[in-house]
Image (cartoon, rainbow, N blue to C red):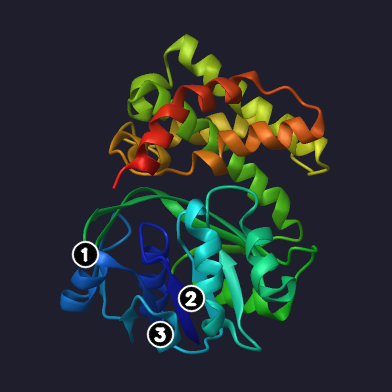
């Protein structure tokens, strides 16, 4: 299978490496120092699940050099998605499909608006990884898991085949008949842990057992669940408790990418997480005071990062 990873960072780089280990032809779209390092020595993966080095078929910042592929794994940050969607047109062609793996609940819709709904499937992932240095991905915890599915519901030969490719590459992958529910279930966690982590400026282990902060975390999860249900998304009755239990299972050093980006003065996914929840809640007639507070507290840092040269 010919696969292109657009955004070969913490998520895309990890899964691209595993798919290459599974025997697939993987090309990478990256930029800057990260791209230069990949071209020089390959993409290195340090992982609790096993180290590896990916020497891609092609590493480039020009998707048209790769040409049409069967699958595009889209791993860019949510705020980069619109530009990435335009750039990946040469990759998709007549028969290609795109799997978005951004944090947030609107990525598939953004891609569908640019590339056509038939080209896009739904997906979400659970993984704790980061770009530790140019050309180096570090996976430090959480068993990587991917859920894929057709946006309209049900399964298909293409999502079954993609899940099988991940599985044969050693990745836990599942097909969901209601992938939007899975995307929202992940969103409950990531929006809450990113927001609370960024506000506290501490790793997960430093705040998850502090009663006042844990209450804030729970409230953020509950608010996101209320918005999902108001928008017709079917969530399991125990989704809040399962989300809290998952957070408790993570290594104490865990931080979210949005938290790290803001701490280091980079643009973050705030607009796709707490800010998106505030907007979607307003549309749905739901109150989300916790996420409104998180957005207000983090907005100055976000605006400063976007103005930086």
Relative height, residue 143 to residue 266 (above, below): below
Residue furthest out toward the top: 212
Q: Is residue 135 visible?
A: no
Location of residue 35 by image quarter: bottom left
User: Which residue is tagged 2?
Assistant: 168
Q: Which is closer to the viewer, label 2 or label 3?
A: 3
Q: Which is more N-terminal, label 1 or label 3?
A: 3
Label 1 Cα crowd, 10 Å radius (few <14 / some 14-19 / many 20+): few
User: From the viewer's perspective, is 95 left or right of 302?
Assistant: right
Labels 3 and 1 touching (C-beta < 8 A)? no
Inter-mark Cα distance, 3 to 1: 27 Å
Q: Which is more N-terminal, label 1 or label 2?
A: 1
Q: Is residue 107 visible?
A: yes
The picture places residue 125, in percent across and down from the top left corner, at 52, 55
Label 3 Cα crowd, 10 Å radius (few <14 / some 14-19 / many 20+): few
| Disc 3 secondary structure class | loop
The picture places residue 140, in percent across and down from the top left corner, at 31, 48
The picture places residue 188, in percent across and down from the top left corner, at 61, 37
Location of residue 154 by image quarter: bottom right
Inter-mark Cα distance, 2 to 1: 31 Å
Residue drawn at (46%, 62%), measured in percent from left and top?
A: 75
Label 2 Cα crowd, 10 Å radius (few <14 / some 14-19 / many 20+): some
User: Which residue is tagged 3?
Assistant: 23
Labels 2 and 3 touching (C-beta < 8 A)? yes
Q: Nearer the viewer, residue 280 or 234?
A: 280
Relative height, residue 64 to residue 104 (above, below): below
| Disc 1 secondary structure class | helix
User: Which residue is tagged 1?
Assistant: 33
Q: Which is closer to the viewer, label 3 or label 1?
A: 1
Q: Nearer the viewer, residue 136 or 211?
A: 136
């Amino acid at each position: 299978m010919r696969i292109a990873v657009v955004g070969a960072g913490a998520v895309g780089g990890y899964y691209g490496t595993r798919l290459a280990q599974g025997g697939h032809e993987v090309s990478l779209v990256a930029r800057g120092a990260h791209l230069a390092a990949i071209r020089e020595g390959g993409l290195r993966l340090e992982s609790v699940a096993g180290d590896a080095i990916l020497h891609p078929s092609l590493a480039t910042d020009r998707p048209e050099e790769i040409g049409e592929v069967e699958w595009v794994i889209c791993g860019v940050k949510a705020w980069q998605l619109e530009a990435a969607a335009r750039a990946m047109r040469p990759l998709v062609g007549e028969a290609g499909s795109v799997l978005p793996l951004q944090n947030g609940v609107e990525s598939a819709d953004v891609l569908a608006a640019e590339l056509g709904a038939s080209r896009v499937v739904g997906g979400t992932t659970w993984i704790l990884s980061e770009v530790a240095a140019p050309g180096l991905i570090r996976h430090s915890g959480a068993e990587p898991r991917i859920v894929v599915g057709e946006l309209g519901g049900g399964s298909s030969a293409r999502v079954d085949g993609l899940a099988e490719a991940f599985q044969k590459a050693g990745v836990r992958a599942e097909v969901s008949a209601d992938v939007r529910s899975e995307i929202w279930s992940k969103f409950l966690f990531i929006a809450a842990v990113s927001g609370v982590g960024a506000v506290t400026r501490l790793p997960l282990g430093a705040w998850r057992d502090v009663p006042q902060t844990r209450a804030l975390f729970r409230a953020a999860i509950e608010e996101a669940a209320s918005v999902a249900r108001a928008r017709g998304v079917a969530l399991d009755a125990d989704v809040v408790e399962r989300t809290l239990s998952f957070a408790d299972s993570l290594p104490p050093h865990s931080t979210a990418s949005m938290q790290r980006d803001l701490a280091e003065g980079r643009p973050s996914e705030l607009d796709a997480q707490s800010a998106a929840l505030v907007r979607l809640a307003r549309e749905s007639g739901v109150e989300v005071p916790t996420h409104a507070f998180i957005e207000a507290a983090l907005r100055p840092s976000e605006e400063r990062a976007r103005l930086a040269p």
